[in-house]
Amino acid sequence: MNLKDTTLYKLLIVLLALASIPALFGSVMEPDGALYASMSKNIILFQDWFNLYGRGGDWLDKPHLTFWITAASFKIFGISAFAYKLPSFLFGLLGAWYLYKLAKDIYDEKTGLISSVIFLSALHIITSTFDVRAEIYITTFTLASIYHYYKAHHGSFWQIIAGSFFAACAILIKGIFVLIPVFAGFIIYWLFTKQYKQLWQPKWWIAIVLIFVFITPELYSLYTQFDLHPEKVVFNRTGVSGLKFFFWDSQFGRFFNNGPIKGKGDISFFLHTTLWAFLPWSILFYTAVINLFKKKNRINLAPESIMIWASAAVTFLIFSLSKFQLPHYILIIFPQFSIITALYLRKLEGRSLKIFFNVQNALAILVFLLLSVLSIIYGFDYPYIMIGMLLVVLASAFIFFKGIKLETIMARSVFISVGLMLFLFIFFYPAIMKYQSGGIAGEWLKKNYPAAKPAVLNYIDAFSFDFYAPGEVKYLHNSSDLDKIKNTKNLVIYISENELNKLKNEYNAEVLKSFEYFHITKLTSKFLNAKTRPQVLEHFYLVKLH
């Protein structure tokens, strides 16, 4: 296929965006996505934009902006999975645009386009389009802030305002620590290039002040919900300060592992996470990073490259040293990874070009074979239709894009991602979501008992039921809670199999419907194999009391 290379990359971006659209019409996935969706639903139900409620009580973990964005979408489109996912999808495209702008301004248009293609086709970006959490928002806001602050070196004061606004938005998604990927790159860049005066420029100190001005809605919300009410029980104790949690416990408390939310860190966690999360580009990325250690490979790069490397390296190091680690954290520095990979790809020639040409081809064939095998063993209704679709995508990549050159590597790699997206969004995710019993039960209840008063007994993680069930869902933590509302008209309770006999014997419970359950974000070989799947399924029930 003979296209001007920049035209090709633009078409690949459009193709990736189009292939993402089916994800918008899938269900909301537990745990985080369904929790955030249910909390945003509560904003609409209670008409309360300042107090956050989740799991049936006051909720203090992440700041408000994720829920405000989603609630605004619910206000416009109604409470639905589509309305929940749409803002994240749009912000993901905005992030790709900012990535293009930043790389274009530092390097050139081609590098900007290649960086955006790599970003949009990375595996964890793809899965985040379906399993929507907060990280896409943080990534875009952080990147937008970096871009505007970069432009502020020689731009007008509005660039400082824009940069501070987006930095504040990133904070309102995740917390204060997002200032590290924003400012670490600039500070190290100024030190390495001996621009010491930048550290004392009034505009940067004004930028810090503006950030704190822009986050005042969050501070007000936390103060009124928690600091004014020390009697509230949060993290199993009273006297919890929302402001202290926001500025210290939620970030530094996790890093030092002395806050209310603890984890077990592994210094190599993000090294092997990146290996799968940044596919099909991870091998190229790691090679690019190793390549940067040789001075001769850095000589002809723009000095601002230091800003990109430093932002990624410092953030990656902090994540790795932290005791609280989750795979999706790494998304925040995928834009920097994409630029580093794009710069290396553009320099490939001769033997190196041929090696990675063969590596990406082998990867395309391997992905096709793995997905084909999975299509058969999972027990899909029409496995050979899926295999045929994957074969068409693979064949198209090899028929239309030929020759050992950069454009071929880019196009074939994107086609790997597009094939994977179609497989996941159209076939795989809809199939496994049938085992997210909370969502299925909530939808069934809304359809068959729209006037029901839904509740959950002794199961605090039924977030998809909370989102899909009609109206507000009550959380019952013990028999005493149940006794208080057992005579409520149209009460329908979602319970696990462990609770069934007790409710039948003591409350004369009638089973309305049973549902099969599996923790679908922790897939196992036994679940993926249709023959062994029944062995690992649990059961949940909707019951009425008489």
Image: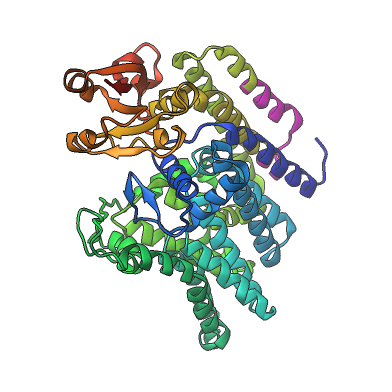
Image location of residue 180, percent across then percent down: 44, 68
Question: Where's the N terminus, which quadrant?
Answer: top right
Q: Is residue 440 left or right of residue 91?
A: left
Image location of residue 77, percent across then percent down: 62, 42
The boundaries of the magenta stretch are 390-410
Q: Nearer the viewer, residue 78 or 492?
A: 492
Q: Is residue 2 left or right of residue 91?
A: right
Q: Residue at x 37, y 32 (%)?
A: 454
Q: Residue at x 19, y 57 (%)?
A: 237
Q: Nearer the viewer, residue 293 or 452?
A: 452
Q: Quadrant of residue 247?
A: bottom left
- Tell me: residue 21, above or below residue 301: above
Question: Where's the C terminus, which quadrant?
Answer: top left
- Tell me: residue 446, above or below residue 113: above
Residue 460 in sight here: no
Image location of residue 486, percent across then percent down: 26, 30
- Tell me: residue 300, above or below residue 391: below
Q: Residue at x 44, y 60 (%)?
A: 50
Image location of residue 5, percent across then percent down: 78, 47
Q: Is residue 279 left or right of residue 501?
A: right
Residue 369 in sight here: yes
Q: Is 168 one of the magenta-colored residues?
A: no
The colour scheme used here is: rainbow
Q: Quadrant of residue 228?
A: bottom left
